[in-house]
Every structure is written in structure tokens, then in C-alpha cells.
Amino acid sequence: MTEKTLTMLNRHRKMKEKIEENPFITDEELASFFEVSIHTIRADRKKIGIPEVRKRTKDVAVTLFGQAKTLNAAEQIGELLEVDLDREGLSLLDTTEEMGIGQTKIVRGHVLFAQANSLANTIVDADVALTGAAQIRFTAPVRVGERVLAKARVVKSKGRKKEVEIIMKTKRGLVFQGMFEVYCLDFNMAGKLQILKSTELQGGEE
Amino acid sequence: MTEKTLTMLNRHRKMKEKIEENPFITDEELASFFEVSIHTIRADRKKIGIPEVRKRTKDVAVTLFGQAKTLNAAEQIGELLEVDLDREGLSLLDTTEEMGIGQTKIVRGHVLFAQANSLANTIVDADVALTGAAQIRFTAPVRVGERVLAKARVVKSKGRKKEVEIIMKTKRGLVFQGMFEVYCLDFNMAGKLQILKSTELQGGEE
DNA sequence: CTAATAATATGACCTAGTAATATTATAATT
DNA sequence: AATTATAATATTACTAGGTCATATTATTAG
């Protein structure tokens, strides 16, 4: 009893690892890996509550698909609370563990910059906004889990160039100050600069 | 002929979008959405070369699973090519469509900032590096698809504070210049500032 | 009217399973 | 040695979400 039980428990443990490192492995592959029948694998999975490959695959896909926005695609980092075009705006970001630096619980600078930058680009009234330059200062570290409120204010507007001041706070105080120079283009201008996708014509903004 | 062909082509176009925005939709759901039979959907998919849900789901999962680091946690934006601690470093970023601003083919400023920032934090010799401030300038827009080379150079080092100059180029020329003030902490110091995760002690760096 | 295309249908097959039940092998206890 | 428990394997029926090939029925343009 003991021996068999041991090999089984051992297999369970290894199986968990195996599936964790490659969630796309099928029962058949697991069966040949562990040199047991496919039925054993299925019984095992059921015991330890691991769903079938397709479920696992879909879970991975849905989770990552949902998170894919976090930094990369990220039309907007943080949630827009208020936008008064060419005047001011507010955005809120709930920081999460993934935004931390390695083993520290400090949020990466570029995450905060991204929130500031997207807010700066959003509050200007333009079809297309491009950041030209910025002077920024991280005045205090932000801890993972803290909620960051960004306040934007358009302080100067001179033709296409607008200056946006951003300050960001957590409940503990000021964490970021920055001045962004944003260039505002309309679709016409953007078209001339050949920066629009050829397939698209009009539609949204930012 | 023309009318039907048109509705079909129209359906094909919408179907592509539909599947792009939700790759997990089944033929059945598509059929009821477009109010055609499931067979039509399958014929359509075959014509335009879109695989079945499970294949799509798996593709999403595999792609994002592999890239999980890039997207989400984003320890490092861009690929490190060379690091000479406290002296200089190089990183390369292949820009993709998701990094673009809305309908333009211009890469978002904060994506470039993230590449610069992560390089600046990587080349300093410290257990934990925190960006304190930065003056940056986006000298030319980067088009989606372009490859961005970032060069970092430590120009000043005064106690914990180091200054890192970053310039970034595409094949078309300079696109970004920046000066980063980076604060370097060792684990001891980081511990005192209570910015380490309680569960972890040592391990990596940056 | 006819030929072409679109839409729908049918039937056989596939993968990677679930679920329930039965059988065989092995090992531990009494 | 016989009993009992567990592990492993097998069997059968069923499922979702398809593929693939081959019809059949509308619609419509020439």
C-alpha cells in the first residue's frame, strides 16, 4: 500500500509542476511521460482538481488576454475620472504586484510615467496628441497596492504646443510631479505627417 | 449576385473584427450573431482562413504565455544587448501595433520611456534602483514596427545618486534623449526603507 | 431560362475529454 | 492463507466543437 501510495503521491506532485510549467500538455502526453494509462492520468487530475487541457488553455488565454492591456497595448493607464478638455483632468490607478520592481514592493517608475503621460495626452483637445518632452520627478516611492490619483492641468497653450502639469498623489502624499509638452494635431495634419494607419480614416481620438 | 456577395463580404469583414476583439467566440455564437446557419460561419471561416475557437484560444494562450513577461510585469521593456555596470548599456525594442496610439501608427511615448527607464535602472550597479527624476525629449515619432536601439551611459555618480543619459534611435535617426537620476540602494538600505517584500529576502537585482 | 454564387443541410469522422462502472494487480493486515 | 484496501487499468456511453466532403435549395445576374 505504502509503496504504491508513495509513487502515486509523487506522481501527483510532479504532475502539478509539469502542468504548471506547460499548461498545454494533454492527458495522452502526460500518460506517456509518467508511463501509466490515460485513465490513471484522468483519475489523478480529478483527485487533485486540475481541469482538462482545453479548460487550462482557455484559462491562460483569458487571463493573459485580459491583462494584456496593462502596459503594452494600454490605450490609457489608469481610469479616467474627469476630463475637462484643454483645462484639467483626473485619473486613478490601482497599482498591482506586477507593477513592482523585482522583489521590492515599489511600483516601477515607468508605470507612473505611463499614467501621467496618458492623462496628459487625453486632456488636450486634439485628434492626435504626441508628447514632445517632459521634466519629471518621482518625489516618493509608491508601494504596490496603493491607489494613485493623477491631476492634470493645462498651464500653457501656444499653437500646437501645450504644456500640461501633472501631479500624482497617494494617500500618503505627493509621489510625482511632471511637466509635459504635448503636440496637438488634427486629422488633417496627422495625415500630412503620414502617421495615420492607411486602412483607417477617422474614428476615435486621444 | 452582387447583393449577396456584398452582404457576404461585409459579414466576412465584421467577422474578422468580431473574432479579433473576442477570439473565444464559438461558431454557434457567431451564427446567432449574424443570423446565419452554423455551416455558413464555418464556410466563411474557411474562406478567410480563420481557425476554430480552440485553435484560436490556444494561439492566444501560447503567444501571451510566452510573452507574459513583456506585457505584464515588464521587468524589462526591450531586450538587453549589452550591460557594462555603472558604465553603459544597450537595449533593443521591436515595436508592435499594440504600442501605437489609437488609430495612428506612432508608438506611445510611455512605451519608449519604459524602455529608457528600465535600461537606466538596469545598468546601475545596485540591488535596487529607483528613478528619482528625468528630463526627456521625444525628438521624432517612432512608427509602429520600427526597431528602437537605446544607448545608456552613466555620466555622473555621486553617492547613491547616479545620472544616466539615454539616447534612442531608429534607423531613421534620433528619436529620444533623456537624462535620468537614479537612486541606488543595496538590500540593507532597501530593507530599512521597508520597500522589500516581507516574504522575500534576496535573489535578483535591479 | 440558365449558370453562378450563397446559404443551408447531411453524414461520417475527429480530438480530448467527462462520467460511471467494472476488472485486475498488488500490497498490507489479520 | 484469506481478506481487505488501494492503485491502475479498461469499458462503454456521452459531450463539445469542430473538419471534410458532398449534397440541396434559394437567389440573382446576365
Image (tube, coloured by chain):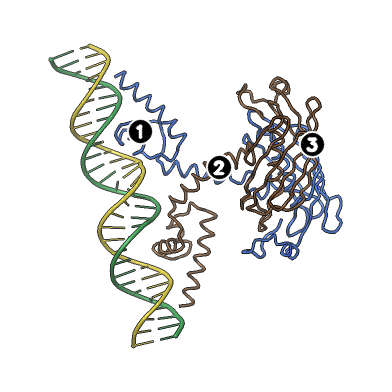
Chain colours: A blue, B brown, C yellow, D green
Q: CA separation, marks 1 and 2?
A: 27 Å
Disc 3 vs disc 1: Cβ atoms closer than 8 Å?
no
According to the picture, the residue beneath numbered tag 1 turns out to be A33
Q: Secondary structure at mark 3?
A: strand
| Residue type of the residue flagged with mark 2 | Gln
Between A70 and B51, the residue placed more toward the observer is B51
Q: Residue at x 71, y 38 (%)?
A: B117
Whether residue A55 is situated above or below residue C6 in the rendered picture: above
Between D20 and A84, the residue placed more toward the observer is D20
Circle 2 Cα neighbour tier, 10 Å, few/some/many (<14 / 14–19 / ≥20): some
Q: Residue at x 31, y 19 (%)?
A: A3
| Residue type of the residue flagged with mark 1 | Phe
Whether residue B190 is situated above or below residue B35 in the rendered picture: above
Callout 1: residue from which chain? A
On screen, residue A203 versus residue A58, left or right, reads right
* Mark positioned earlier in the residue sequence (3 or 2): 2
In the rendered view of the protein, which quadrant contains the C terminus of chain A? bottom right
**Percent coordinates x, y for residue A175 in the rendering:** 77, 35
On screen, residue A37 versus residue B100, left or right, reads left
Q: Secondary structure at mark 2?
A: helix
Q: Are marks 3 and 2 on the same chain?
A: yes
Q: Residue at x 73, y 51 (%)?
A: B173
Circle 1 Cα neighbour tier, 10 Å, few/some/many (<14 / 14–19 / ≥20): few
**Percent coordinates x, y for residue A150 in the rendering:** 76, 43
**Percent coordinates x, y for residue B28 in the rendering:** 42, 58
According to the picture, the residue beneath numbered tag 3 turns out to be B133
Residue A92: image quadrant is top right
According to the picture, the residue beneath numbered tag 2 turns out to be B67
Q: Residue at x 34, y 25 (%)?
A: A8
**Percent coordinates x, y for residue B122 in the rendering:** 68, 33
Q: CA separation, marks 3 and 1?
A: 53 Å
